[in-house]
């Protein structure tokens, strides 16, 4: 459930008309609902019941400081994949003791930053990375707490670009090699082997891949225990999907009900890394129709938001529902492409979509845009990135100002020669 609803044919974000926000902030604009974020996090966190756990929000999904601060106050930690995400999480007030650091390409400066901050754990992806982390930790005179990320070779029914659990992917350690790698790792003086990490992908709408991967992880825990290697943390990753169109993903309660028999009684702390399931349906992108173009019996709705603002449709052929901000009675329906101003044929928000007929100047809302929307935006075509707004009840606040043309050239210079 989200709190973007029509009231007398006008789209509201909680108790605020979207049109009112646009009148003050302009378009394109991302709008987030506080109540939706709060509801989704509490539903996910409470689903664990009495299981010892920590929910670390996947910062990659939406890294705005206000969003991170909100979730941190609700008890969330952070799943990070860069030094920049660590900086954001700390600035947002999230305790370093609730931060886990994943990613295949951690740099020295990032390792040093995380070690000095005393984060909870590094999720390590390769032996060269672990050796380097051991070296960096030794130079700082500390120990790094780590989990091996294991790759269970489990296929998740999702887009191949966001499937990460197969052996052919760049992520993690082949689970069949894990025992020998754990045994080697315990000889490193500056490494505390504490956990296992598994993450099989994103936008997964079935429970069975999660269960199958965890069964393999539990078997690995037993084998490690026989070797005298104790595990304190099991990081089950994230990836639970949401409804964009007609998907029927499991609820957090159904998800936990399915995996609880596997993880209960292990005597470990369970770490989970949800992102999309918390923030995806908590945000929309509002854009204005600039022109209606008809060409060779094809309709184009040209809007002021482009692939630089929301790249998911271009990158993944992802579906986002598109709604008018203000409904009109007896509006005919047409089949059209919704396209942006970017000079790429791949610049579209929807293709061959049956939609209400829009006219120039109208506002449209691109739904379920809270995850991997602004976070993946860019300045391509030298377009300033858009504003972000957070609504709570009958109030709203700009939580990221729209960039200016001066912002675009900050840090650039023309050599004297």
Image (spheres, rainbow, N blue to C red):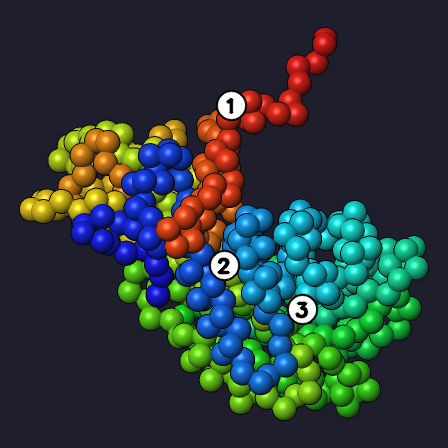
Q: What element carries label 3?
A: strand
Distance between the alpha carbons at the discs numbered 3 and 1: 42 Å
Residue depth check, mark 3 versus mark 1: number of the one nearer the observer: 1
State which quadrant residue 76 falls in. bottom right
Q: Is mark 2 on a helix, strand or loop?
A: helix
Which badge, 1 or 2, comes first in the chain's sequence? 2
Rendering coords of residue 8 (x, y %): 18, 52
Q: From this viewpoint, which residue is outermost toward the top?
A: 417
Q: Which mark is residue 385?
A: none
Distance between the alpha carbons at the discs numbered 1 and 2: 33 Å
Instruction: Please report the residue visible at 30 percent of the width from the left and 60 percent of the height from the top.
Output: 245
Rendering coords of residue 257 (x, y %): 47, 84
Q: Nearer the viewer, residue 213 or 307?
A: 307
Q: Name the residue under label 3.
A: 149
- Whether the residues at callouts 2 and 3 have beta carbons within 8 Å, the answer is no
Q: Mark 1 points at which residue?
A: 405
Q: Name the residue under label 2.
A: 162
Horizontally, is 61 left or right of 174 in the view?
Answer: left
Rendering coords of residue 32 (x, y %): 42, 51
- Mark 3, Cα crowd under 10 Å, few <14 / some 14-19 / many 20+, is many
Residue depth check, mark 1 versus mark 2: number of the one nearer the observer: 1
Instruction: Please report the residue visible at 46 percent of the width from the left and 54 percent of the height from the top.
Output: 371
Q: From this viewpoint, which residue is outermost toward the left?
A: 330
Q: What element carries label 1?
A: helix
Residue 316 seen from this side: no
State which quadrant residue 174 falls in. bottom right
């Amino acid at each position: 459930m989200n709190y973007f609803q029509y009231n007398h044919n006008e789209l509201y974000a909680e108790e605020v008309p979207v049109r009112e926000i646009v009148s003050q902030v302009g378009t394109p604009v991302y709008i987030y609902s506080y109540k939706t974020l709060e509801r989704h996090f509490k539903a996910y966190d409470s689903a664990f019941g009495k299981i010892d756990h920590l929910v670390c929000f996947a910062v990659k999904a939406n890294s705005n400081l206000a969003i991170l601060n909100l979730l941190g106050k609700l008890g969330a930690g952070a799943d990070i994949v860069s030094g920049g995400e660590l900086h954001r999480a700390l600035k947002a007030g999230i305790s370093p003791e609730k931060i886990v650091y994943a990613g295949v390409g951690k740099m020295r400066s990032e390792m040093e930053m995380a070690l000095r901050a005393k984060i909870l754990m590094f999720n390590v992806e390769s032996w060269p990375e672990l050796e380097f982390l051991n070296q960096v930790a030794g130079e700082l005179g500390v120990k790094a707490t780590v989990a091996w990320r294991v790759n269970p070779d489990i296929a998740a029914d999702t887009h191949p670009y966001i499937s990460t659990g197969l052996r052919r992917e760049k992520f993690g350690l082949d689970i069949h090699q894990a025992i020998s790698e754990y045994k080697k790792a315990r000889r490193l003086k500056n490494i505390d082997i504490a956990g296992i990490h598994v993450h099989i992908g994103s936008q997964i709408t079935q429970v069975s891949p999660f269960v199958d991967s965890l069964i393999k992880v539990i078997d690995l825990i037993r084998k490690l225990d026989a070797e005298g290697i104790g595990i304190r943390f099991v990081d089950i990753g994230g990836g639970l999907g949401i409804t964009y169109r007609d998907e029927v993903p499991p609820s957090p309660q159904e998800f936990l009900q399915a995996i609880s028999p596997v993880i209960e009684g292990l005597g470990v702390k369970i770490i989970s890394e949800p992102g999309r399931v918390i923030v995806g349906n908590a945000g929309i992108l509002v854009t204005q129709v600039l022109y209606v173009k008809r060409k060779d019996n094809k309709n184009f709705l040209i809007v002021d938001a482009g692939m630089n603002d929301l790249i998911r449709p271009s990158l993944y052929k992802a579906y986002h529902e598109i709604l008018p901000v203000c409904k009109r009675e007896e509006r005919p329906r047409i089949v059209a492409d919704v396209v942006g101003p970017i000079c790429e044929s791949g610049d579209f928000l929807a293709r061959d979509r049956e939609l209400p007929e829009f006219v120039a100047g109208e506002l449209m809302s691109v739904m379920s845009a809270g995850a991997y929307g602004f976070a993946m935006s860019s300045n391509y075509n030298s377009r300033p990135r858009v504003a972000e707004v957070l609504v709570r009840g009958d109030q709203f606040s700009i939580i990221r100002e729209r960039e200016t043309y001066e912002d675009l050239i900050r840090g650039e210079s023309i050599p004297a020669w």
